[in-house]
Image: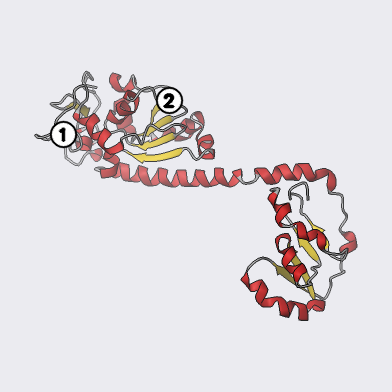
Amino acid sequence: MTDMPPATVTIPDHLTPGDNPQELVQTQAGDWIFPALNGLHFSPSAEQTIVPGTSPAQQALQAHFRNRLHQQDRLYVMIGSDSGQLIRFVQEKSPLPRGSRWLFIEPEPLARILKRTPAVAALLDDYVHLITPEEWDEATELLLLNDYFRINGVAFERSLAALDHPTPDYLELVDQFDAELTRRRYVVTANLGTAPFLNAQLANTPSFFANLVPLKGIFKGKKALILAGGPSLDDQIDWIKANRSRLFLIAVSRISARLLAVDIHPDLIATVDPYPVSLTVSRHMFGFGPQTILSPAIMPTPAS
């Protein structure tokens, strides 16, 4: 990025710690940077040896990120682009890893400057994007954010400038998108867990024609007690047996073996788990007599 012409658009005062607006400028080593954001990171020290073919900016980024930004099947959400040098860092490690995308987010004034800089614009393509916060929704649809969440492939990273947050803008962006990604991750992963239940429900549909009307009122006057696995169950076995006639017992299918072992027959056994292992763990539920009602909801593993 040593041949990059200076930008003609300046940064507003609120984005710099000083009193004067600043432009994208070239360092003595040839890197184009926003001095207020990356002057400290990309200024070579007197004793530093610059590797031929690279620059202080690229060496600093390599020392910090190493290979962290070049893993397969990742969507990298990056706060800041370190004056565009981080975009160059990503692109110069070619070939890019299979299945990955990079989304750089900059405050609007900085993004505008960088996009109008030919050397930066040339680095943007279908895999590497530079956006403002206002373009987030459109970009995430284009880059399939939810699909990356489904494979646990979303990586949230901060540029060196965002780590040092020399402006309040980066602090706000980090907080905003950390919260947004947490929210989106929860929604996507929560919905992932419904698929096995829906599949089992569809497979079970032809079997569910039972009419519950005959059961109405037959447990009237009894106290309902729900039994599930846990150490407290063993502590209450004697009390349950002593008060069995006054109780309407509902039990989860996984404790059927334990109840049979102590001769407690519940009034209703509930089973829900859609996975085949559920039938193995709960197979003793078929050992109860006809007085025990098996209530499989609508989504246990179809074999049960």
Q: Secondary structure at mark 2?
A: loop
Residue wearing tag 2: 127
Counting residues from the start of the chain, the first of labels 2 and 1 encountered is 1
Give residue 74's mark: none
Residues at circles 2 and 1 in contact by the CB criterion of under 8 Å? no
Q: Secondary structure at mark 1?
A: loop
Q: What percent of the width, then of the height, locates residue 136?
A: 44, 35
Residue wearing tag 1: 43
Answer left or right for 216 relative to 264: right
Q: Residue at x 48, y 35 (%)?
A: 137
Residue 24 appears in view: no
Answer left or right for 167 relative to 286: left
- For the N terminus, the quadrant is top left
Image-quadrant location for residue 240? bottom right
Q: Residue at x 70, y 56 (%)?
A: 281
Q: Residue at x 87, y 49 (%)?
A: 209
Specify few, some or many for label 2: CA neighbours under 10 Å numbering under 14, 14-19, or 20 or more. Answer: some
Q: What percent of the width, then of the height, locates residue 285?
A: 78, 60
Answer left or right for 101 relative to 66: right
